[in-house]
Amino acid sequence: MQTLTVVITGAAGRIAYALIPLVCSGMVFGNETRVNLRLLDVNFAADKLQGVAMEVEDCNYPLLEKCIATLSADEAFHDADVAVLLGGFPRLQGMERKDLITKNAEGIREQSRTMDRVSKTTIKVCVVANPANTNCLVAMKFAPSIPPENFTCLTRLDEERLRGFVLQKTRENKLAGVCAKDIKDLSIWGNHSATQVPFIDCGYIETPGSRVQVSELYSSEVERKELTSQVQNRGAAIIKMQQASSGLSAANAIANHLADWLNPNVSTDKIFSMGILSTGNPYGIADGLVYSFPLRRCAGGVEIVPDINISAHVREMLAASEAELQGERQDAESLVGDLTIATRARL
Ligand code: LMR
């Protein structure tokens, strides 16, 4: 049985509280992998962090080898195999995620420098703290000993939101017996922001004896537009209702993201979304951004699904998200310096 050392930053927060049980129960890395958990947070959350660690002890998760709660990034990241970067200032009502660049980019840079010094060079990193794409670029930049393809950002939450809305639509259209897992090959392109592009054209719904293209459920432009807007604005809608950003659904999406990326026992034939370095992508998106694409597993990692037909309208949307990410990159560069990534990503 292998053991993975998994770091969760912002570990006293809401997402971590929902993520820890998933990581320690086999849902992420499989039932044959034990976990050595490192919970990291900042000084002002010290008591809460300790409380979370005490609860983890009381859970006696069968796959948990050891849990350390620490305020030291060096201790947390030492020899780590996987890191989930949740820690950062959260979006409040009325903010866009990019408004958080000034609050979070420098913290990510410092954590990344630490990873560069003390983690395994094979570490796999999932950036969640917003703005997730641009923070991921910062993380990549300041850990030059770790290959860029080991850094991803979370857009799976948007993909799951898209799946949820499509599921509702199947019910409105009286398609019987469809569960979320039957809705396959949806994807998110671009930024984890209000410019993201939820994409249904490869999507299909498969139940015993039936296969329906998702696009058949959205015959009019009006319906497609509404779907796009619902997904783009779901995070803000949750903040409005809860006065806090998503926790449960974010944790669930992180678990799916990590499993599809890293768990060898998970099916490899499906499409899923993550933000990765855009350099060398086959869709003409500018190099040097962290951009979400439809991906699938390949030997040794993930690859962008090639040859997808993109309409002129979707192309415009992809370009708008690209332009937003270029702007975010410039804003981040004014804080942390040049974000050119020297190494070409393996795509
Ligand atoms: C989300 O999408 O729920 C998170 O990124 C939090 C946010 O700011 O919306």
Image: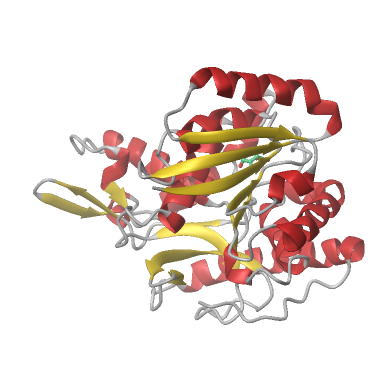
Q: Locate residue 306 relative to residue 192 in the image: left or right.
A: left
Q: Locate residue 42 relative to residue 261 in the image: left or right.
A: right
Extreme residue toward the left, this view: 209
Instruction: Give 175 or 112, whichever is nearer the viewer.
Output: 112
Residue at 66 percent of width and 30 percent of height: 239
Q: Is residue 181 above or below residue 346?
A: above
Instruction: Give 142 or 294, whichever is nearer the viewer.
Output: 142
Ligand 1: give its quadrant. top right
Residue at 42 percent of width and 29 percent of height: 62
- The location of residue 10, given as percent across then percent down, is 71, 37
- The location of residue 298, given as percent across then percent down, is 38, 71
Hey, which quadrant is residue 321 in on the image?
bottom right
- The location of residue 177, given as percent across then percent down, is 19, 34
- The location of residue 146, given as percent across then percent down, is 66, 68
Q: Is residue 117 visible?
A: yes
Q: Is residue 232 visible?
A: no
Instruction: Give 134 or 114, whichever is nearer the viewer.
Output: 114
* Count of all numbered marks drawn on residues in the image: 0
Instruction: Give 202 or 154, whichever is nearer the viewer.
Output: 154
Asked which colour scheme the image uses, the reply is: secondary structure
Residue at 54 percent of width and 17 percent of height: 58
Residue at 70 percent of width and 68 percent of height: 323
Q: Locate residue 329 relative to residue 188 in the image: left or right.
A: right
